[in-house]
Amino acid sequence: MKSKLLVAALVAATVTGSAHAAPFFSDDFQSNGVGFNIAPSGWTVSGGTVDIVGPGYFPGLCAPAGAEKCIDLDGSSSDAGVLSRVFSLTGGNTYTLSFDLAGNRRSAGTETGTVTFGTSVLGFSVPATQTAYANLSLLFTPGSSGNYSLSFANDGGDNMGAILDNVVITVESNGVPVPGTLGLLAAAVVAGIAARRRRN
């Protein structure tokens, strides 16, 4: 009887417990070739251009200095583009976007722009001389399931934008077990059944 109660408690705790964070998406841009006025794989650029910088293309811009590849949000066309990507999201789940920004290190002043994730909007302001990444984050909980856009828009058009890297999205399932949690649930049930059989 005790083993049945243990299994029931484990199931209840897993299914009705607090939200479970799980990886959803990440891109550090390392799989891309470097170049001016090109879009990283899986992303689109509208209204202008971005650069993928790294070895042979301003390698010192990625933070920390010497990091392999990153995105200059103001490409080499004197017209900063909007870097975007579309995701299929589940209504009611909370998605947390995090990303790293640094200055362009080639001018004075401040780089400003806007990050949009679904209906959530975050303005950024990064000193051009900032050499270390600042980690920023933005939450979005869609009201219904569907396709939603993530975009990074740098203001200005002097070919020297904020430096973007390490874009990560995690999801909190708000009580619905994520795949990893389902595996733990199955293991708990099997362990409970085994314990019961040993006692019988």
Image (tube, rainbow, N blue to C red):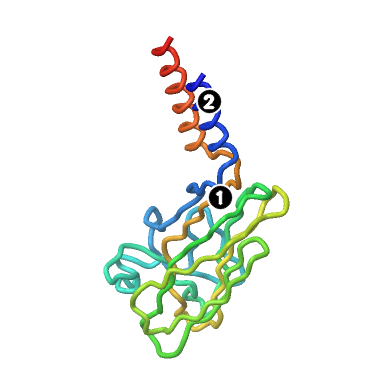
Q: Judge the density around disc 2: few (<14), some (14-19), many (≥20) Cα neighbours within 10 Å.
A: few
Measured along the vertical axis of the image, is residue 68 above or below residue 160? Answer: above
| Disc number placed over residue 188 in the picture, else none | none
Residue highlighted by disc 2: 5
Disc nearest the viewer among 1 and 2: 2
Q: Amino acid at mark 2?
A: Leu
Measured along the vertical axis of the image, is residue 148 above or below residue 106? Answer: above
Relative to the observer, which residue lies in front, 162 or 123?
Answer: 123
Q: Position of residue 152 (x, y in %)?
A: 55, 68
**Which part of the image, by quadrant, shows the C terminus?**
top left
Q: Amino acid at mark 1?
A: Glu
Q: Residue at x 43, y 12 (%)?
A: 197
Relative to the observer, which residue lies in front, 110 or 179?
Answer: 179
Q: Position of residue 104 (x, y in %)?
A: 40, 79
- Numbered disc 2: secondary structure: helix
Identity of the residue furthest to the bottom in this view? 108
Residue highlighted by disc 1: 172
Q: Judge the density around disc 1: few (<14), some (14-19), many (≥20) Cα neighbours within 10 Å.
A: many
Distance (Cα) linking label 1 and label 2 = 28 Å
Measured along the vertical axis of the image, is residue 118 above or below residue 124? Answer: above
User: Which of the 4 image quadrants contains residue 191?
Assistant: top left
User: Counting residues from the N terminus, which is met first, the one under dot 1 or under dot 2?
Assistant: 2
Identity of the residue furthest to the left in this view? 66
Q: Residue at x 51, y 66 (%)?
A: 137
Relative to the observer, which residue lies in front, 35 or 105?
Answer: 105
- Numbered disc 1: secondary structure: strand
Identity of the residue furthest to the front in this view? 1
Verify CB contact (< 8 Å) between mark 1 and mark 2.
no
Q: Position of residue 55 (x, y in %)?
A: 30, 65
Q: Is residue 9 left or right of residue 134?
A: right
